[in-house]
Image (cartoon, rainbow, N blue to C red):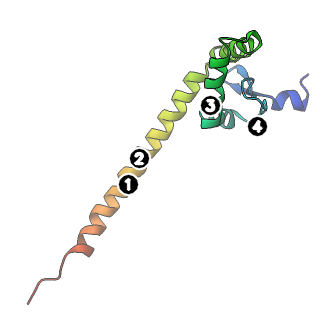
């Protein structure tokens, strides 16, 4: 049976368990859920570390192995698809909000901007 610590270190997406930690970043952060993990993977700090690691991996075998482990984790857990789903959901949410806001603005804004008719 899994301990609480083991359970918290993984997240279930479908029937698959995803390790909720970043093996690429120097601090090896651990996350409470998939959402926080995806936020980290798309962050500027993570992308900065990824770029530097890719550059350093050309010369250092230990760093190359770290990058290989990260890429395997990324592919095995289909992180790219999770990020795409998340972006699509955010775009859909933005689009639905814009539609509601623009309708309110167009009906309310026209009346307040008109000059009263001159007598």
Residue 83, position as x, y percentages in the image: 56, 29
Q: Is residue 77 visible?
A: no
> What residue occupies the far left of the structure in this picture?
119
Single out the mark in the foreground, 4 or 1: 4
Residues at discs 3 and 2 in contact (Cβ within 8 Å): no
Single out the mark in the foreground, 2 or 4: 4
Estimate the spatial distance between the alpha carbons at disc 4 and disc 1, rounded to whole Å.
Answer: 34 Å
**Circle 3 SS class:** helix
The mark that comes first in sequence, 1 or 3, is: 3
The mark that comes first in sequence, 2 or 4, is: 4
Residue on which the image places disc 3:
48
Residue on which the image places disc 1:
100
Estimate the spatial distance between the alpha carbons at disc 3 and disc 4, rounded to whole Å.
Answer: 22 Å
Residue 32: mark in rendering: 4
Q: Residues within 10 Å of mark 2 (few under 14, many from 20)?
A: few
Estimate the spatial distance between the alpha carbons at disc 1 and disc 3, rounded to whole Å.
Answer: 37 Å
Single out the mark in the foreground, 3 or 2: 3
Single out the mark in the foreground, 1 or 3: 3
Residue 38, position as x, y percentages in the image: 63, 32
Q: Quadrant of residue 1?
A: top right
Residue found 76% across the figure and 28% down from its top:
21
Using the image as rendered, state which of residue 54 and residue 4 is in the foreground.
54
Q: How many numbered discs, if any?
A: 4
Estimate the spatial distance between the alpha carbons at disc 3 and disc 2, rounded to whole Å.
Answer: 33 Å
Using the image as rendered, state which of residue 22 and residue 116 is in the foreground.
22
The mark that comes first in sequence, 3 or 4, is: 4
Q: Is residue 71 visible?
A: yes
Residue 46, position as x, y percentages in the image: 65, 32
Estimate the spatial distance between the alpha carbons at disc 2 and disc 4, rounded to whole Å.
Answer: 29 Å
Residues at discs 1 and 3 in contact (Cβ within 8 Å): no
Residues at discs 2 and 1 in contact (Cβ within 8 Å): yes
Residue 96: mark in rendering: 2
């Amino acid at each position: 049976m899994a301990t609480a610590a083991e359970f918290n270190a993984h997240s279930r997406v479908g029937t698959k368990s995803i390790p909720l930690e970043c093996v690429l970043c120097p601090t090896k952060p651990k996350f409470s859920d998939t959402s926080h993990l995806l936020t980290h993977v798309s962050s500027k700090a993570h992308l900065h570390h990824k770029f530097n690691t890719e550059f350093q991996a050309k010369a250092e075998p230990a760093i190359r192995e770290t990058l290989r482990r990260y890429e395997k984790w990324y592919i095995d857990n289909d992180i790219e698809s999770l990020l795409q789903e998340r972006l699509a959901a955010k775009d859909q949410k933005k689009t639905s909000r814009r539609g509601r806001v623009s309708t309110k603005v167009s009906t309310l804004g026209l009346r307040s901007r008109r000059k009263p008719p001159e007598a």
